[in-house]
């Protein structure tokens, strides 16, 4: 039996198990003991009533008060979530799902994660590495037949050190079809028109959407599935994350669209011609499922500890594999931001503190970073014992 056939058989078995497990998991989340409503606040603000939440209780109320002002000032429409260890200690929506007709934004709405999607792509690739189907220091051409640059390795792509040019320029210059391009089309454009690299692979860092689009094609080639199919069956379903999807999945009313502020109202942003290309963007999620994703990574639920260290920790300075690294005071911050078609998102995790901060928005809110940094700095100060 061929590898593709074995993977297909395994997926059908795993899907049946995951359906049962996800139902059980959802029931557990919906019990009265899981999240408790505080009448002092409102019906979209939740906190966990244990010692972990009590540690932040004073700070959370102070943050809530300031967020009311900041979200109005910056016309923020989105969701803010704060997690401590495995618990949600604060979660609230602000503004609207559709700011034109002012329909309500709920915790069930899914945001296009933009470049925050890259961590999902990295995990998909590293899952193949863990299975021994891919090797980090092997040439990409070993896995994608005909890929012209044999000196680019899988690790180069994950670390943004490949030297590949921006595929969007190739599409704008050479793509004439009325149907937007896919990942396969991007590979074909690279092979046909990219005659040289921007720099020799491995010699320097240059943030690259192209590299992660190529990684999605690598996943397809090795797994004998579409990227979105492998992503669902091998990454999401084993973790019970049934509320995460890609742009290519069937969209529904809970998948948000992007908007651009215009005077006192907003304009809807039309879909980009690049949206069918996955790997560099294109994952949709709620804040809740994104937090569950971070917990799964921290608990080595899908990847083992050795591989998870490669995912989260940069050995070349500032970028690991789908995550950036920096320091706030003496604390390591593992994070990534995303910007695409009106969506501005940020995910930060402080492993030494067990602290997670998620800010998702969809109306081109330039104040997103200030909101995110305010929460981050206020909570880090509490760990340092500062008021």
Image (cartoon, helix red, strand yellow):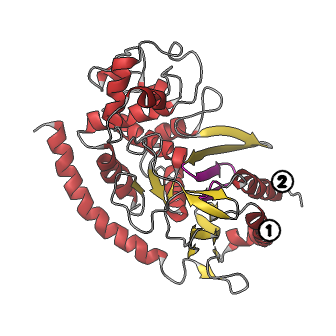
The residue under label 2 is: 384
Going by the image, does 358 lie left or right of 378? left
Residue range corresponding to the magenta coloring? 341-364
Which is closer to the viewer, label 2 or label 1? 1
Going by the image, does 83 lie left or right of 269? right
Residue at image position (26%, 23%) is 145
Magenta stretch: helix, strand or loop mostly? strand
SS for dot 1: helix
SS for dot 2: loop
Q: Residues within 10 Å of mark 1 (few under 14, many from 20)?
A: few
> Percent from the top left, x then y, of residue 349?
63, 50
Q: Upstream in the sequence, badge 2 or badge 1? A: 1
Q: Tell me the tag on residue 289.
A: none
Q: Is residue 126 placed above or below 341 in the rendered structure?
A: above
Q: Is residue 190 placed above or below 280 in the rendered structure?
A: above
Instruction: Decide which of 157, 338 is in the foreground and name it.
Output: 338
Residue at the bottom extreme, as displayed = 39
Q: Tell me the tag on residue 69.
A: 1
Magenta stretch holds residue 174: no
> Percent from the top left, x then y, of residue 309?
54, 38
> Percent from the top left, x then y, of residue 206?
58, 25
Count all numbered tags in the image, as a single digit: 2
Q: Quadrant of residue 123?
A: top left
Magenta stretch holds residue 359: yes
Q: Is residue 355 placed above or below 94 in the rendered structure?
A: above
Quadrant of the drawing holding the C terminus: bottom right
Residue at image position (45%, 76%) is 28
Residue at the right extreme, as displayed = 387
Going by the image, does 219 lie left or right of 324? left
> Percent from the top left, x then y, of residue 24?
37, 73
Instruction: Decide which of 239, 306 is in the foreground and name it.
Output: 239
Q: How far apart in space, not on screen, are marks 2 and 1 (Cα)?
A: 25 Å
């Amino acid at each position: 039996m061929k590898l593709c056939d074995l993977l297909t058989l395994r997926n059908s078995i795993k899907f049946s198990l995951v359906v049962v497990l996800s139902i059980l998991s959802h029931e557990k989340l919906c019990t009265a003991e899981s999240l408790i409503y505080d009448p002092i606040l409102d019906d979209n603000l939740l906190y966990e009533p244990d010692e972990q939440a009590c540690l932040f209780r004073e700070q959370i109320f102070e943050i809530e008060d300031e967020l009311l002002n900041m979200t109005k000032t910056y016309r923020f429409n989105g969701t803010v979530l704060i997690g401590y260890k495995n618990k949600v200690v604060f979660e609230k929506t602000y503004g609207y799902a559709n700011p034109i007709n002012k329909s309500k934004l709920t915790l069930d709405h899914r945001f296009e994660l933009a470049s925050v999607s890259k961590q999902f792509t990295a995990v998909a690739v590293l899952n193949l590495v863990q299975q021994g189907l891919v090797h980090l220091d092997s040439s990409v051409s070993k896995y994608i037949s005909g890929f012209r640059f044999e000196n680019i390795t899988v690790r180069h792509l994950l670390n943004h050190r490949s030297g590949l040019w921006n595929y969007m320029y190739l599409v704008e210059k050479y793509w004439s079809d009325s149907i937007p391009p896919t990942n396969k089309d991007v590979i074909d454009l690279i092979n046909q028109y990219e005659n040289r690299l921007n720099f020799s692979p491995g010699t320097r860092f240059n943030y690259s959407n192209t590299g992660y689009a190529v990684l999605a094609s690598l996943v397809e080639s090795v797994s004998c599935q579409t990227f979105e199919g492998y992503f669902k069956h091998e990454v999401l379903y084993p973790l019970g994350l049934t509320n995460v999807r890609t742009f290519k999945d069937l969209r529904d009313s809970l998948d948000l669209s992007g908007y651009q502020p215009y005077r006192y109202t907003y304009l809807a942003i039309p879909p980009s011609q690049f949206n069918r290309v996955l790997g560099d963007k294109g994952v949709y999620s709620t804040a809740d499922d994104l937090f569950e994703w971070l917990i799964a990574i921290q608990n080595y639920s899908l990847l083992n500890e050795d591989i998870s260290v490669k995912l989260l920790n940069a050995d070349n300075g500032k970028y690991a594999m789908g995550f950036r690294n920096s320091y706030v005071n003496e604390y390591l911050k593992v994070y990534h931001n995303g910007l695409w078609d009106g969506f501005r998102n940020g995910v930060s995790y402080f492993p030494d503190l067990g602290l997670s901060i998620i800010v998702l928005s969809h109306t081109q809110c330039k104040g997103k970073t200030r909101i995110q940094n305010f929460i981050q700095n206020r909570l880090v100060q509490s760990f340092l014992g500062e008021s």
